[in-house]
Image (cartoon, rainbow, N blue to C red):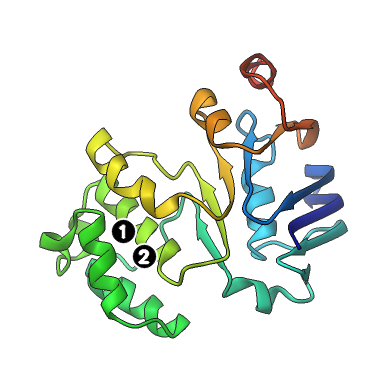
Amino acid sequence: MRAIELADVGRAYGERVALSGVTLAVEEGETLAVFGANGAGKTTLLRILASLLRPHRGEARVLGHALPKEGWAVRGKVGFLGHDPLLYRDLSARENLEFHARLHGVELTRVAELLEAVGLKARANDPVHTFSRGMIQRTAVCRAVLHAPELLLLDEPFAGLYPGAKAHVEPLLAGGTRVLISHDVEEGLAAADLVLGLKDGKVAFCERSATADDVRALYA
């Protein structure tokens, strides 16, 4: 089964077209790396795949479900990591993750395992508002993978992480089916099975053999 199928997908914000004519297919187990300058439509695409935004045109299927009609069936199977960590700042890291665990019917032992895996065991009971940016990002990664999603949607997952913290996080995000937005050209290409380049909301290329020069041209 194809994990993602998009046919002529578009989205606008009032008069501004954010995405236009996006067509692609991602197989199960593959990583789609998405590149483009600010405003190219990367985050809009990710939010459509997460069923957080409705496409205004075209057809979208994620994990076999048509969007937006069957968005309810997609949300429990997707792990979404965007610019907003989606954490309650006055709750502790443990309380945040236990809240999401109950939503997904996940055993609470999973929370302790993840916090230890990302090096936050000692700060598990501290409010999130006392955390550094990197600690917040590590907690957000835990939230995204908590329910062992079938599809990970990742917008700059290593933002704000020093090398040691990144080493903790990388194994949690490895494998499976992923859509990865990255500004690190070499890292993104190394992870990718399929590379999507967006420019001004349109597909500049969608290839399995895209090069670093192809990607850098998007920012010219």
Kind of residue at disc 1: Thr
**Residue depicted at 25% across the width and 68% down the height:** 113
Quarter in which the N terminus is drawn: bottom right
Quarter in which the C terminus is drawn: top right
Looking at the image, is mark 2 or mark 1 earlier in the sequence? 2
Indicate the quadrant where residue 117 lies: bottom left
**Residue depicted at 43% across the width and 63% down the height:** 145
Q: Position of residue 107 (x, y in %)?
A: 34, 83
Q: In the rendered image, is residue 91 in sight?
A: no
Indicate the quadrant where residue 153 lies: bottom right
Badge 2 density bin: few <14, some 14–19, many ≥20, Cα 10 Å: many
**Residue depicted at 44% across the width and 85% down the height:** 105
Q: Position of residue 210 (x, y in %)?
A: 70, 24
SS class, disc 2: loop
Q: In the rendered image, is residue 95 in sight?
A: yes
| Front residue of this view, candidates 187 and 89 | 187
Kind of residue at disc 2: Leu
Q: Which residue is mark 2?
A: 87
**Above or below: residue 63 compared with residue 191:** below
Relative side of 74 to 172, left or right: right
Say if mark 2 contacts mark 1, CB within 8 Å.
yes
Indicate the quadrant where residue 22 lies: top right
Q: Which residue is mark 1?
A: 139
Q: Position of residue 147 (x, y in %)?
A: 45, 72
Relative side of 24 to 92, left or right: right
Relative side of 45 to 103, left or right: right
| Mark 2 → mark 1, Cα distance in angstroms | 8 Å
